Every structure is written in structure tokens, then in C-alpha cells.
Amino acid sequence: MDILKKYFHLTPHQEQQFAALGELYPEWNQKINVISRKDIGNLYEHHILHSMAIAKVINFQPGTRVMDIGTGGGFPGIPLAILFPETHFTLIDSIGKKIRVAQEIAAAIGLKNVDIRQLRAEEEKGKYDFIVSRAVMPLGDLKKLVQKNITKEQKNAIPNGMIVLKGGDLQAELFPFRNIVEVQDIYELMPEEFFKTKKVIYLPM
């Protein structure tokens, strides 16, 4: 928990919700594997704080609608929904058992601003201001899937689009978008060893 408070100012209610994740995820992960068993001990840094890096590049305005594609057990959607209680998040994944974990955890911490559904991105018809994801697929493939879902109405300081978490060498993947994509090194924002190769990628659409 302390690592979250190092980089974010949290209300007492948010602190309670984030603290609860530390018990809920390991408990659920024993039944349904949504996080590598070797990595569950790094839950706060590798999964929760990593998800929250998106909040370092955008402060979602109240009423913003965000879709998290391929959410798995709820990343980055659940940590972001805790941080932005007046933003509405739709979390989708095609794997039912992973969605069940996200649903149960959101219910247990009393998250009111999430809708969590088993769904393929191709099937989602709703309109959103932003699409977020964590290393789900190459940027070009994701753009093709979700461009139908981006609304034209603007509410935020940056234009609507995709904000995704990625790691490693992204040069070839980002080359087609080189003139419009914005890349933020997470390590510059939160200098923890784990984030040395991690980035937040923003593609306006």
C-alpha cells in the first residue's frame, strides 16, 4: 500500500479500497489464476501501481466513459475506477472466469462506477471517450477493433483516443503512428526498477 501513497494522494475511502485488494486478489488467485503465482507477491507494484500510471498522463473528468479491453482480472480498470469515482468504466474480456474475478472484487470493495462483462471487443457497440488496455495486442490491431467505439464528443484536456500500457522495444509497432503517438516512460514518473522498460502509449483518434 505504501508504494501507492508515495505517488498518489488518496482519500481514506480509496485507501480502504486499495488495501482490500491486497487480500482479495491473492484469495481469488488461488481459485482462478489471473496473476502469475510467482508474481502475486508484487501485486501492488507490478499490477495496481502499473495500472495507475495511466492517471499520470490524464486526469479523467467527471462523466468520462472509459472501456478497458482484455481486462483479465481487472487491470487497469479496477485501480483506475477507484482513483476516478466519477468516471464510468466498462471492463470487458472474452474469458468468463477472469471476468468473474473482476466482478467479485469490484462488488467486494463497493465499486459503483464499473460495468464488467464477458464480451469480445468486436461485439461491443457502445461509445467511449477513451479505450485503455494493458499489453493486450499490437497497437494497430487494437485501433482497428475500437475505432468504432470512440465518441466525437470531447470532455477532457486531451482528445479522445487509446491509452495503453506496454513494455519492451516498441519501435516497429509504433512506427506507423510515429507522427501522432505520444510515449511516456513510466520510470520518469515513478522511478521504481520494475518500470524501467514500461511505457504509457497515447494515440489520439
Image (cartoon, grey):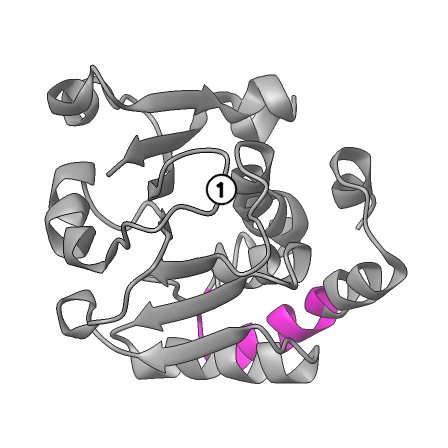
Question: Is residue 50 rendered to the left or right of residue 127?
Answer: right
Q: Quadrant of residue 87?
A: bottom right
Q: Quadrant of residue 13?
A: bottom right
Amino acid found under the numbered disc labelled 1: Asn
Establish if 138 lies above or below 177. below
Element class at badge 1: loop
Question: Is residue 162 rendered to the left or right of residue 49?
Answer: left
Span of residues in magenta: 21-34
Q: Say which of 41 and 157 sits in front.
A: 157
Q: Residue placed at 29% from the left, 34% from the top?
A: 204
* Horizontal and vertical percent position of residue 42: 63, 49
Q: Is residue 36 visible?
A: no
* Horizontal and vertical percent position of residue 37: 51, 61
* Horizontal and vertical percent position of residue 104: 56, 84
Establish if 13 lies above or below 130. below
Establish if 92 lies above or below 186. below
Residue beneath disc 1: 156
